[in-house]
Image (tube, grey):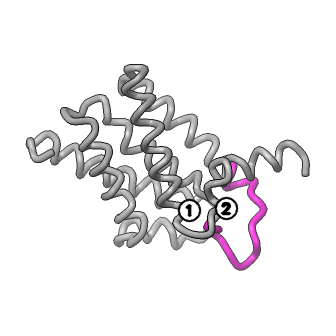
Amino acid sequence: MNFQLYLIKTLGTFFGVGLLPSFQGTVASMISAFLLYWLSLALNFNILVQVIIFILIFAFSLLVVIKYDYKADNKDPSEIVIDEVLGVAVFMIALPLSSNPEIYSILSLLIFRFLDFFKPSVIYRFQIQGTKTAIILDDIMAGILTLILVISLDINGIV
């Protein structure tokens, strides 16, 4: 296997998390939320840094889903979990604005996983497109809806 394919597989599986026998998306979401939370607080990230992180993860995700070697019958392989990492990066953009970062992160993660698993109407419409980019679009949408929901709760003092 050449280096480019190795890198694509490593990033796509989020350093092997996608190769777990079950709950790959949940584990990838939890690890990435913890890492982004910890980095954000430890290094005092602002929103601009969070947006830059999202853009970088988006670029890597797009590269992975375009270059990944898919089996003909599986348009969204379970081992690709970089899309979950991308969805987490979306809702973590607003972490610096939160009045309670711990609650924001945990609640956001729970809502994101709920939306990503059940895929309500808007999210489902992105997933059924059947394109390689649809793999990441549904997670971006789940991240955006999560961000809007949790920021609304935070602004109104519920979180």
Instruction: Give SS at disc 2.
Output: helix
**Amino acid type at mark 2:** Leu
**Amino acid type at mark 1:** Gln
Instruction: Give SS at disc 1.
Output: helix
Main SS of the magenta segment? loop
Q: Residue furthest top?
A: 44
Depth check, front residue: 123 or 3: 3
> Label 1 to label 2, Cα distance in Å?
7 Å
Residue 123 percent location from the top left of the image: 41, 65
The structure residue drawn at horizontal position 49% and vertical position 47%, both measured from the top left corner, is 31
The structure residue drawn at horizontal position 35% and vertical position 71%, both measured from the top left corner, is 120
Depth check, front residue: 138 or 29: 29
> Is 87 positioned to the left or the right of 11 in the image?
left
In which quadrant of the rendered view does residue 39 lie?
Answer: top left
Q: In the image, is residue 53 part of the stretch drawn in magenta?
A: no
Residue with the mark numbered 2:
19
> Is 115 positioned to the left or the right of 10 in the image?
left
What is the span of residues highlighted in magenta in the rendered image? 63-78
Q: Quadrant of the C terminus?
A: top left
Mark 1 and mark 2 residues within 8 Å of each other at the beta carbon: yes
Q: Which mark is residue 24?
A: 1
Position above or below: 3 against 23 = above
The mark that comes first in sequence, 1 or 2, is 2
